[in-house]
Image: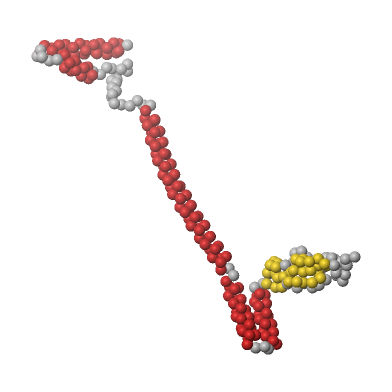
Amino acid sequence: MEEEQKSQKNVTNKMKDLYNTYLRQDEKKPVGNSENTVKAETQSDINDVHVPTEGGAEQEQSATELPAEISPIMKEIESLRLAITEAEKERDENRDKLLRTVAEFENYRRRTEREKEQLMLYASEKTLSKLVSIIDDLHAAVEAGEKSKDYESMFSGLKMIYTKAMKMYEDHGVKPLNVEPGEPFNVDVHEALMHIPHPDTPEGHIVQQIQRGYMLHDKVIRHAKVVTSAGSGE
């Protein structure tokens, strides 16, 4: 308590001395000095006075110093700004990747379409190239028939062409459906063109084959066209 009273007394004395000093200076200054100049100087000296705190230490605070609570907010703003910049960068990279992926997929689709068209257009090229030889043989047989009336030779040539053609088809997995009269009608391999009474053939059985059918491996590529029996008709 005693120290505090001494400190206050020292401050009071210093203020008195400061005031007396200004009075003396004021007496020495010309009359033309403005009141604003005196006030500014007085204010400057007063600002230089350090008022002791309760603990005896001097306390100063700059007018430009930010409050302590502003610093965490500024740090948070900077952190958010960096996060936004990183997110925008990632967005741009993902957009570029997406555009490249879409372009690659479009190119792949177009290439696949072209390959599909080419495959459909030339899928039978290998088989047809072999069938050309059969056409050549048939053409030669027709020319020979026009020049000669030897039907036995013509028949022999046609038989050879037929054998050659069947061998070529068999090499590609094509085989004929052998249908005999009296066989039960099978909708999976037969196609009924007519259904007629036939006393010698049970109803639902084959009376006659009109056109031979063919299979490619295990698949029917053409049904055998047949005539079926309707029974005795009585």
45 over 177 or under it: above or below: above
203 over 35 or under it: above or below: below
Q: Residue at x 75, y 64 (%)?
A: 188
Horizontal and vertical percent position of residue 53: 30, 17
Q: Residue at x 77, y 72 (%)?
A: 209
Horizontal and vertical percent position of residue 230: 84, 65
Horizontal and vertical percent position of residue 59: 29, 21
Horizontal arrangement in the rendering, residue 103 relative to residue 162 (left or right) = left
Asked whether residue 117 appears in the rendered view, the answer is: yes
Of residues 3 and 199, the one drawn nearer to the viewer in this rendering = 199
Asked whether residue 167 appears in the rendered view, the answer is: no
On the rendered image, what quadrant is the C terminus found in? bottom right
Model colouring: secondary structure
Horizontal arrangement in the rendering, residue 161 relative to residue 230 (left or right) = left
Horizontal arrangement in the rendering, residue 34 relative to residue 63 (left or right) = left
Horizontal and vertical percent position of residue 102: 48, 52
Q: Residue at x 24, y 13 (%)?
A: 11
On the rendered image, what quadrant is the N terminus found in? top left
38 over 89 or under it: above or below: above
| Residue lying at the far right of the rendered structure | 234
Of residues 190 and 27, the one drawn nearer to the viewer in this rendering = 190
Quadrant of the rendered structure where residue 199 is? bottom right
Quadrant of the rendered structure where residue 125 is? bottom right
Of residues 155 and 16, the one drawn nearer to the viewer in this rendering = 155
